[in-house]
Image (tube, grey):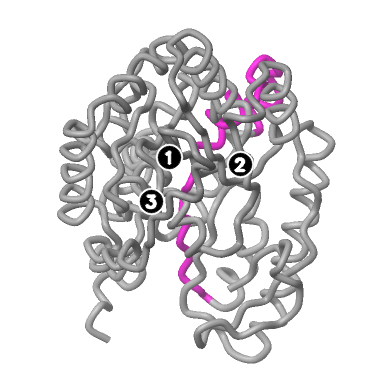
Amino acid sequence: MICPDAPNYPRGKHVVDGIEVRRYRSAFEADKIIGYLYEYVVSIFSIFYLLSISQLSGRFRVIQYCNPPDLLFLSVVPSKLLFRARIIFDQHDLGPELMAAKGFSKRIIMAKLSLLFEKMSYLTADHVISTNLSYRQIAITRGKKNPDDVFVVRSGPSRSWADAVRPDNAFRRGHKYQIGYIGVMGYQDGVDLLIKSIEILVKRDNLDVYLVLAGGGTEFEVLRNLTDDLGLSNNVEFYGKISDDVLLRNLIASSDVCAAADRKNELNDLSTMNKIIEYMALSKPTVLFESKEGRFSAGDSALYALPDDPESLASKLKIALEDATLREKLGKTGRARFEQHLCWENQLETLRLAYWGEELQL
C-alpha cells in the first residue's frame, strides 16, 4: 500500500497487519488551484517513485488506485505498459462534480480538464470500482465503460466494527442531549449549517444540546470561529482528527442522534457518505439533508430535512431528540439495513470479481 503520511503515521516503510505500507511526505491540504497543483504533483511523483521501487522486487498482477485526483493514472500507466499489470480505478469521487462543488465550475478550462482526466482514468482502467449505482451509471455512460467491467463495492465497515463500543455519558459534559458528527469539514460538507441548526435548538427551542465533531478539513478553523461568533462554545466540541478508532466509535455511540449536513449539489446528491453508514452500524438514528444516495443508504433509519436549510435540520433534530422511542426504532432499522445490505462482508465477492474476473478460481 502506498499512501501519504499523517500525524501519528510517519513516512517510510512499515508493516501493518502483515501488509507492507510505504508512506510518502504529504503536501499541505489545498483549497486553491496553485495548492491543488502542488499537492497533485507531489502525490503523483511520490506514488510513481515508490511503485517503481516496489516493482523491482516483484511484478504486481493488480494495481488499484483511488481518486481524487483523477490525475493518478499517470502514476500507474508505466506498470500497465511495461509489466502488464491489471489496473483498477477505484472511484471515490466524481472529479468534474467535485470541481464544481469546490467552486471551479465557472472556469471553463478547469471543467474541461477535469472531464479529460476522468476520461483518461476510465480509459486506463481494466475494471472500475464504483461506490454506488449512481457512480456506476456515470462510468458506463460518461466513461463509456463496458457494464461488465464496472463493479459496485460499497465501503462500509464490517459487522463486528461496532461490537467493542462503550457509550460513555462523560462525553456529553453534563448536557441532556448529544448530537454526533464524524467526517470531513470542507465547505461542501455543510458543517456550518449543522452548527447554525444547533444555534436554533439552543437559543430558540431552549434545548440542552451538545454537538461533538470528529474530523478535520479546510473549514476547520472557520467552523471554530463560527462557533465562537454564535456564542456556542459551551455547546459544541471539536475533537479534530481522532487517530484512535475505538475512541471515535465510543464518541459517536454515546450520541443520542447523529447528523449529516452535506450541501445540495450534484456531487453530494450522487455520492454515498461513509459517515451515514457508520452511524447505522452503531445503531444510531440519523438526521440529514435530503439527497438521492443519502436516502438510498439510510432508508427508513433517518429523518430527512430540506436541503441546505438549518431551520429544517433543527426541526428534525428536535423531533428525534425528544422522542426516545423513535430514536430506538430508527437505530434498530439502520443496524438491520447495514447488516443485510451495506456491511463489508456483503461486498467481498464483488471485490474478488473486480480483481480477477474469470480468473477468480486461480
Residues in magenta? 84-113
Q: Amino acid at mark 3?
A: Ala
Q: Is residue 226 left or right of residue 196?
A: right
**Residue 17 visible to an observer of this rendering:** yes
Q: Amino acid at mark 2?
A: Phe
**Residue 152 visible to an observer of this rendering:** no
Q: Amino acid at mark 1?
A: Gly
Q: Position of residue 230 (x, y in %)?
A: 67, 16
Q: Residues within 10 Å of mark 3 (few under 14, many from 20)?
A: many
The quadrant holding residue 136 is top left
Q: How far apart in space, not on screen, are marks 3 and 1 (Cα)? A: 40 Å
- Residue at mark 1: 143
Q: How far apart in space, not on screen, are marks 3 and 2 (Cα)? A: 40 Å
The quadrant holding residue 279 is top left
Q: Position of residue 44 (x, y in %)?
A: 72, 58
- Residue at mark 2: 117
Instruction: Name the one closer to the observer, 141 or 337.
Output: 337
